[in-house]
Image (spheres, rainbow, N blue to C red):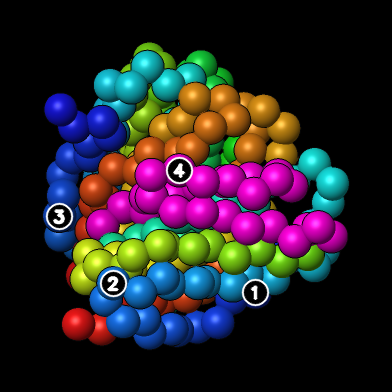
């Protein structure tokens, strides 16, 4: 059984489009996260949600809007995509102080 | 901004112990040390964490110096599947608000 899943795995789109990435965890965790890993492999946190409430917002452009319909889901919507948004986006979840479980990633390519 | 320093790369022979060092000289008293690894484009995988005592689990051992300014991750019998980038992270933030700041990590290559 997949613990943290993301869809789609690959996403190729043109500049200016709006796209969404979905994340689901079946671990019963309270906290979910979005990370971005750029071409230089730096992995940076973008957002975290605890019990559907936004906890961390790391100075991400407001074109990025996370939405958590319930504790098991944290979706990432991106408006007006730019070339610099090309990256691998990872979703993760955790139970309070314990380790974070990461999804397989979504490779976004903006052309 | 990562609060840790790691060597950029290391090699280890298959079957030997891999010892990965990490410096975190500015760590605060309540900050935990976490280790994750990322195997070629997969999502990072949790390995182990500790505060001040040495820790061991089925994957690895974590040795933290008494002054807590450095630590070593030990993979006791490295296999080819352990080839990955290993991240040493100081976790900051309160419960539910904790943040992992990944640095550049150590690229560990296991040599057959």
The chain to which mark 1 is attached is B
* Residue beneath disc 4: B57
Residue name at image x 32 percent, y 68 percent: B78
Q: Is residue A109 above or below residue A55?
A: below
Pointer 4 chain:
B
User: Callout 2: helix, strand or loop?
Assistant: loop
Hey, which quadrant is residue A5 in on the image? Answer: top left
Q: Which residue is the site of mark 3?
A: A10
Residue A110 to residue A75: above or below: below
Q: Is residue B43 magenta?
A: yes
Marks 4 and 2 sit apart, C-alpha to C-alpha, by: 18 Å
Whether marks 4 and 2 lie on the same chain:
yes
Image quadrant holding the C terminus of chain A, namely bottom left
Mark 1, secondary structure of its residue: loop
Q: CA distance from mark 3 to mark 4?
A: 34 Å
Of badges 3 and 4, nearer the viewer stands: 4
- State which region is magenta: B42-68
Q: Nearer the viewer, mark 2 or mark 3?
A: 2
Q: Residue at x 28, y 34 (%)?
A: A4
Q: Earlier in the sequence, mark 4 or mark 2?
A: 2
Q: CA distance from mark 4 to mark 1?
A: 24 Å
Instruction: Between label 4 and label 2, give the one nearer the viewer.
Output: 2
Q: Would residue B45 be found to the left or right of residue B48 on screen? A: left
**Separation (CA) of disc 2 from disc 1:** 26 Å
Judge whether A24 appears above or below A62 on screen: above
Question: What residue is pinned by disc 1?
Answer: B5
Question: What mark, if any, has residue B15 been given in the picture?
Answer: 2
Q: Are marks 4 and 1 in contact (CB under 8 Å)?
A: no
């Amino acid at each position: 059984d997949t613990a943290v899943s993301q869809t789609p795995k690959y996403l190729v789109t043109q500049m200016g489009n709006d796209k969404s990435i979905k994340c689901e965890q079946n671990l019963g965790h309270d906290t979910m996260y979005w990370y971005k890993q750029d071409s230089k492999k730096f992995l940076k946190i973008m957002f975290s949600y605890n019990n559907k409430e936004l906890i961390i917002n790391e100075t991400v452009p407001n074109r990025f809007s996370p939405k958590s319909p319930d504790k098991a889901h944290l979706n990432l919507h991106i408006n007006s995509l730019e070339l610099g948004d090309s990256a691998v986006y990872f979703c993760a979840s955790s139970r309070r102080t314990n380790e974070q479980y990461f999804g397989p990633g979504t490779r976004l390519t903006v052309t | 901004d990562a609060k840790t320093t790691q060597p950029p790369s290391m090699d280890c022979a298959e079957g030997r112990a891999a010892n990965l060092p990490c410096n975190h000289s500015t760590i605060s008293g309540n900050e935990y040390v976490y280790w994750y690894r990322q195997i070629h484009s997969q999502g990072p995988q949790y390995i182990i964490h500790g505060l001040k005592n040495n820790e061991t689990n089925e994957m690895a051992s974590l040795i933290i110096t008494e002054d807590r300014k450095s630590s070593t991750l030990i993979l006791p019998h490295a296999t080819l599947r352990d080839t990955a980038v290993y991240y040493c992270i100081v976790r900051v933030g309160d419960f539910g608000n904790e943040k992992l700041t990944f640095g550049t990590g150590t690229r560990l290559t296991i040599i057959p």
